[in-house]
Image (tube, grey):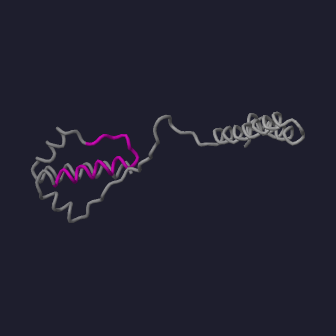
Amino acid sequence: MISPLTTVLIVLAAAAAGIALVVSGNLALQESAATLAVTFGLLAGVAHYIKSAPARAPGHAVVEIEPTYAPLGTEEIERARRGGPFDREAVVLALDSIERSGPRPELPSTPIDEMRRVTHLPAKEFRAYLAGRLETLENEL
C-alpha cells in the first residue's frame, strides 16, 4: 500500500517534471525543475521502501533456531546404561533435550550437581532413575 507521503512526493515529482517540460527559454528554471523532479522521485522510492520493508530488530538480525536432539538408538542406550558416567550423561542430556523439545521448552538442563549424582548411581538405581524420567516424559507428551 502506498503511504500518503509517497503519494505527495510522486505528485510533486510529476508537477516538477511538468514544469521542466513546459518552461521554455529559461534553462536555469528547466534544470531546477528537472532536478526537483528527480529528487522527489527518489524520495518517493525511499519512502515507499521504508514503509513496506519488514520490521527488523535494531542493530542485529534475529535468527530462530528449532530445538533439536539426536535420538539415541537402543544399542547406545543399553551401552550407556551399563557404561560409565560419560555414557550415562549422554542419556540424561538426551532426555533433557527431548523434554525441552516437547511441551516444556523452558526447562533447563539437569544441574551439574544432579548430573554428577545421577551418573555415579549404581546400575539398578540408574535404571530406576531412567524409568522415572521416561514415565514423566510419557505422561507429559
Which quadrant would residue 3 be assigned to in this image?
Answer: top right
- What's the magenta region? 87-109
The answer to whether 134 appears left or right of 46 in the picture is left
Residue 15 falls inside the magenta stretch: no
User: Going by the picture, which residue comes out furthest to the bottom?
Assistant: 75
Residue 93 falls inside the magenta stretch: yes
**Residue located at (86% from left, 37% from top):** 19
Which quadrant would residue 44 be assigned to in this image?
Answer: top right
**Looking at the picture, how far across and down is residue 64, in whole percent?**
44, 46
The answer to whether 62 appears left or right of 39 in the picture is left
**Looking at the picture, how far across and down is residue 30, in whole percent?**
82, 37
Up-down: is 93 above or below 15? below
**Residue located at (79% from left, 37% from top):** 31
**Looking at the picture, how far across and down is residue 76, in whole percent?**
20, 62
Up-down: is 31 above or below 120? above
Q: Nearer the viewer, residue 33 or 2?
A: 33
Q: Nearer the viewer, residue 87 or 23?
A: 23
Q: Nearer the viewer, residue 58 or 120?
A: 58
**Looking at the picture, how far across and down is residue 18, in whole percent?**
86, 40
**Residue located at (90% from left, 40% from top):** 22
Q: Quadrant of the N terminus?
A: top right
What predominant SS class does the magenta segment belong to? Answer: helix
